């Protein structure tokens, strides 16, 4: 169907355009609100700055399509093919994308707040500076993906995979990644608060220059992990494996090292250990008794959060 005919039918009130072939069509800037585009072939189509709010694109082919700056809040994209699609600065708040294919897609600077990506494939995708606040990434494949400076607060990651993922300088607050395999993950410069990493494998992970507050590493494997110049405020390392872990120039002043042999880790004169160098502390809430916090978490470097308002 020609684009002119398609748009004329829309203006006449038709809303169901399932299974049409609109490959390589130029639909930039069009308004298609509450439209049914199930199974439509939009391969290579230009939908930049289009308004697709509350539309259903389930099963559609949007691989290599240009959806940059598109408005797609509350859209339904179940099993949609968005392989290598351009989704830069797309507004997709509360959209549903279960089992969607986004391999190699570019989602930089997009607003994905509250979106549901359950079971989607985001391997090799670029999610730098995206807002994923309270999104559902359960069962998602994030292998080799980039989430630099992304807002990952409150994200659900149950069953997700992160092989060689880059989360450097990201904001990670109140997430549960307990018991997962995150070996080699990159958290350089990240800000992590209230995260649960109990029993997680972080072998070879990079936390250089990261700020960690109230993070639970109980029983985690931190072998060969790098915490160089990291600041760890009220962090629980009880029973963690720290074989050859790099704590050089690291601030461990407010860290619980119960059942941990710090001698197995790499330290230097700049490593700040707790005032009382007794590492087998009782397991209770009283080991955090310091007069002044190291970081004012809510007020330090607020610029990172300004990009994610609304």
Image: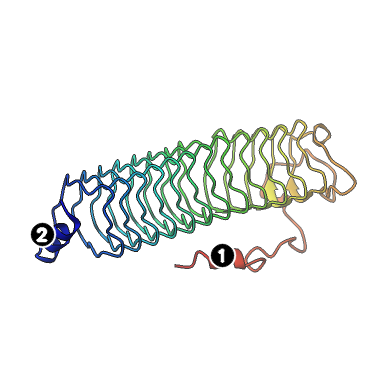
Crowding at mark 2 (Cα within 10 Å: few <14, some 14-19, many 20+): few
* Residue 242, x across and y down, in percent: 74, 34
Q: Nearer the viewer, residue 283 or 127?
A: 127
Residue of label 2: 14
Where is residue 61 shown, x and y percent of the image? 28, 43
> Of circles 2 and 1, which is in front?
2
At 58% from the left and 55% from the top, the residue drawn is 149
Residue visible at 61% across and 67% down in the picture: 303
What is the number of the mark on residue 305?
1
Viewer-side residue, 305 vs 220: 305
> In what element is the residue under mark 2?
loop
Asked whether, in this view, residue 161 is left or right of residue 254, the answer is left
Question: Considering depth in this image, is 232 or 49 the residue closer to the camera?
Answer: 49
Say whether marks 2 and 1 touch (CB < 8 Å).
no
- Mark 1 surroundings within 10 Å by alpha-carbon count, few (fewer than 14), some (14 through 19), many (20 or more): few
Residue 15 image offset from top left, x and y in percent: 14, 58
Q: Residue at point 59% right, 63% down?
A: 304
Task: Look at 58% across and 48% down and name the residue there.
Answer: 195
Farthest residue, direction right:
269
Label 1 SS: helix
């Amino acid at each position: 169907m020609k684009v002119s005919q398609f748009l004329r039918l829309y203006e006449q009130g038709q809303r169901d355009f399932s299974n049409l072939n609109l490959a390589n069509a130029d639909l930039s800037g069009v308004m298609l609100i509450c439209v049914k585009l199930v199974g439509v072939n939009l391969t290579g189509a230009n939908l930049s700055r289009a308004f697709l709010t509350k539309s259903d694109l389930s099963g559609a082919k949007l691989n290599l399509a240009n959806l940059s700056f598109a408005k797609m809040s509350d859209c339904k994209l179940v099993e949609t093919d968005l392989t290598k699609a351009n989704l830069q600065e797309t507004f997709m708040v509360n959209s549903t994308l279960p089992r969607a294919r986004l391999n190699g897609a570019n989602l930089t600077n997009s607003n994905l707040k509250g979106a549901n990506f359950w079971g989607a494939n985001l391997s090799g995708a670029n999610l730098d500076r995206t807002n994923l606040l309270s999104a559902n990434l359960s069962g998602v494949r994030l292998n080799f993906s980039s989430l630099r400076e992304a807002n990952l607060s409150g994200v659900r990651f149950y069953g997700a995979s992160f092989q060689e993922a880059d989360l450097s300088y990201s904001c990670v607050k109140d997430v549960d990644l307990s018991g997962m395999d995150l070996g080699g993950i990159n958290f350089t410069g990240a800000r992590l608060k209230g995260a649960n990493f109990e029993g997680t494998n972080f072998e070879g992970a990079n936390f250089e220059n990261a700020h960690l507050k109230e993070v639970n590493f109980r029983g985690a494997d931190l072998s060969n992990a790098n915490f160089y110049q990291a600041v760890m405020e009220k962090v629980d390392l009880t029973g963690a494996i720290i074989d050859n872990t790099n704590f050089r120039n690291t601030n461990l002043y407010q860290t619980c090292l119960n059942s941990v042999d710090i001698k197995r880790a790499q330290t230097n004169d700049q490593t700040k250990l707790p005032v009382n160098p007794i590492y087998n502390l009782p397991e209770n809430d009283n080991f955090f008794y310091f007069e002044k916090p190291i970081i004012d978490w809510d007020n330090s470097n607020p610029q990172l959060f300004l990009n994610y308002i609304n």
